Image (spheres, rainbow, N blue to C red):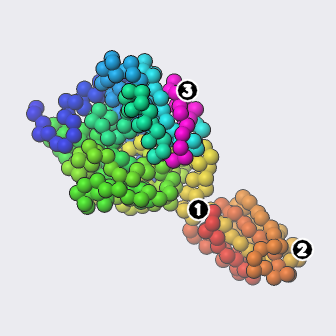
Amino acid sequence: MTVKHVAGPTLAEFEAARATVAMVAQATPMETSRYLTGVLGSEVFLKCENLQRTGSYKLRGAYNRLSQLTAEERAKGVIAASAGNHAQGVALAARELGIKATIFMPQGVALPKLEATREYGAEVVLTGHIFNESLKAAKEFATETGGIFIAPFDHEHVITGQGTLGLEILDEVPDVDTIIVPIGGGGLISGVASAVKQKAVTLGRTVRIIGVQAENAAAYPPSLAAGEPVNVEVHPTICDGIAVARPGTLNFDIIKDTVDEVVTVSDDDTARALVMLLERAKLVVEPAGAVGVAAIMAKKIKNAGKTVAILSGGNIDPLLLQRIVGHGLAASERYLKLRVMLPDRPGQLARTAEIVSEQNANVVEVLHTRHGRGLQISEVELELHIETRGKEHRKQVVKALRDEGFKVRISDDI
């Protein structure tokens, strides 16, 4: 059957890339989510690229790109810049193909990502304090040495490799109505959208593609409104894997023709999604990989029908995960921090703990001081960190303390 070509590589090119990528990448699990199905009102599946080799989808595009290099290009070696997933994808792809890889990473890169990249056989050069400084150094090194620079998203072979994930989704959920995809520079969604839209024609149906960006690094909404890629200021976000200031040129051209909608989510939304994935799905997902789930939970997705949300990666520093889980619990109103002013006399601390216990809440940390600002000489300040069951339980704990006559302030500084 002849397929009307949409923006991006042809369906035949995606199919050929799929055979290539299959030599190194695995077909990742497709899980159902009863919880998200209840939230969305229609069946939800999770495509677990967080369980892919190297911990993300990036291996697909990297391996497809490197496999297209000539013998002469391979002999020159490959060079990349990355703070994480792209580094690991390029490093493993290069090792499998017998190519020397040099990866430039920021000096403050998370230790697990640094060690994994080295273990895959790449030479790592730590330079710069932010990604853009590492990127500049990598491109200069490529110019000096003649090595082949491997772009993270703005290259046709990378896009084609990432698009193999879309074909895999259609095999596993052939009647899918909506696919939700994280967006940074646009490599994943441009490949998935192009491949899926073309394959859907052969199946006699349509599939809706929705992209999700972190609201503090959302270059696509203004770019789509302007009709061309524009730069945005990237603000701090836990979704560092998709914190890109400008869309890729090739990616944008495909996305504007094939993606139906782009929405944004806050870091609080993403933190809540990570906690839900840990608790309900037993899945470890990095913040950038969880934004599709965050969009569902934040009610940003409407009239979706049968839906697949791509969990694009699972590479997260355990220390960061610890902080995000705490933040996610607070954002879900399951973690309460109180400042309680107490008379400075015996038994007050014990009575406070007793009241919290009577409300079936759990105190996880206590700080006691006589030197807080605004305290009277006859007062002490008690800071309580309490686990609760949600919004109503929080109100119940606070009311019980106030009913006892204690002055209570709720702190948002978790």
Alpha carbon distance from label 3 to label 2: 58 Å
10 Å crowding of disc 1: few (<14), some (14-19), many (20+): many
Task: Give the extent of the magenta segment.
Answer: 113-131
Between 152 and 74, the residue placed more toward the observer is 74
Work out whether mark 3 precedes mark 1 in sequence or the reverse, and give the earlier one.
3
Work out whether mark 3 precedes mark 2 in sequence or the reverse, and give the earlier one.
3
Q: Where residue 375 sits: x, y (%)?
A: 78, 79
State left or right for residue 145 relative to residue 106.
left
Give residue 23's mark: none
Secondary element under disc 2, as helix, strand or loop, is loop
Work out whether mark 1 precedes mark 2 in sequence or the reverse, and give the earlier one.
1
| Residue located at (28% from left, 46% from top) | 249
Alpha carbon distance from label 3 to label 1: 36 Å
Q: Amino acid at mark 3?
A: Glu
Q: Where residue 32 sits: x, y (%)?
A: 40, 44
Alpha carbon distance from label 1 to label 2: 31 Å
Give residue 119's mark: 3
Q: Give the residue number, with chain letter if any, for mark 2.
A: 346
Q: Give the residue number, with chain letter if any, for mark 1.
A: 330
Q: Name the residue furthest left.
A: 2
Q: Amino acid at mark 2?
A: Pro
Secondary element under disc 1, as helix, strand or loop, is helix
| Residue located at (41% from left, 23% from top) | 77
10 Å crowding of disc 3: few (<14), some (14-19), many (20+): few
Q: Where residue 174 sits: x, y (%)?
A: 26, 39
